[in-house]
Amino acid sequence: MLPVFFYLFSIIAIFSAIMVITTKNPVHSVFFLILTFFNSTGLFVLMGAEFLAMLLLVVYVGAVAVLFLFVIMMLNIDFSSLRAGMIKNAPLGLLIGAVLLGEIIFSFIGMKYGISEIPGNELFVKLSEIENTRALGNVIYTDYIYLFQCAGLILLVAMIGAIVLTHRRRENVKKQDAVKQTLRDKSDSIEVSKVEIGKGV
């Protein structure tokens, strides 16, 4: 059944990838992109790369594709000008596509060599003995722990910078002061009124 699922996922992924760039409706293009991601996830599972499959499903399908969909649906984009720009940049796109196609062909040619004949294959041999997720965790949290922490700090600084750049002080806008609310006295927050019967406050 493995070849059957491989060809099934591959055919659907290729068809949906072609539909992403040929469909005139951008919302339909995003839907076909999500379908491409799902079938690519199936191919990763068949190859035994369960971590990449989970990463593709959670990050790209759950975040990036949904973000694309919301942006397309909420923004008023002039797609006629985008298509004109695509036609103008078509030669550059064809050149980049030819380079990527050449890399794929060279990758298939290189598959005829065994894993023992590839220089520096010690890591691949170790990865084949245990699960991918466990091997990746062992490498990240031992040999590359400082680089991993530095990457986290860089992302934290980028997030704080984005918040600071987008935060604006606006006049005549009521905002809550958390410090003032925390330090206020009971007399400032509670008012006891004696209301007469039949009358409101």
Image (tube, rainbow, N blue to C red):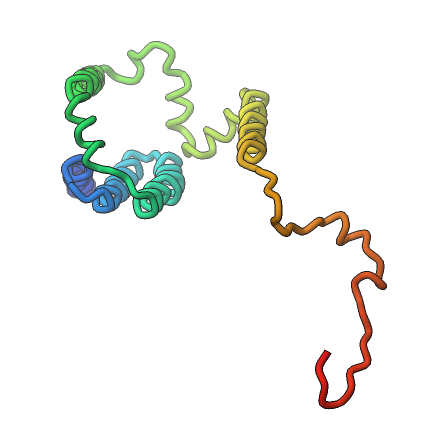
Q: Is residue 39 above or below residue 182?
A: above
Instruction: Determine whether 186 is above or below 141 in the image.
Output: below
* 99 left or right, relative to 124: left
Nearer to the camera, 185 or 24: 185
Q: Is residue 185 above or below residue 62?
A: below
Q: Could you say where residue 127 lies in the image, as x and y percent from the top left?
A: 40, 26
Q: In the image, residue 46 lies at what x, y percent? A: 27, 38
Estimate the x, y position of residue 181 in percent, counting from the top left. 75, 54
| Most foreground residue, 186 or 28 | 186
Query: Is any part of residue 112 visible from this angle?
Result: no
Which residue appears at 21% of the width and 32% of the height?
81
Left or right of residue 64, residue 138 in this image: right
Quadrant housing residue 56: top left
Q: Residue at the location (61% across, 39% down)? A: 169
Quarter holding the N terminus is top left
**Among the 4 quarters of the image, the one containing residue 63:** top left
Residue pictured at 37% horizontal, 34% vertical: 52
Figure quadrant of the C terminus: bottom right
Residue 157 vs residue 85, the one in the foreground: 85
- Which residue is farthest top? 119
Camera-nearest residue between 89 and 13: 89
Instruction: Point out residue 83 in the picture as x, y percentages from the top left corner.
Output: 18, 32
- For image coordinates 15% across by 41% down, the residue present is 23
Mark yes or no: residue 150 visible: yes
* Count of numbered marks: 0
Farthest bottom residue in view:
198
As drawn, the residue found furthest toward the front would be: 172
Q: Is residue 135 left or right of residue 62?
A: right
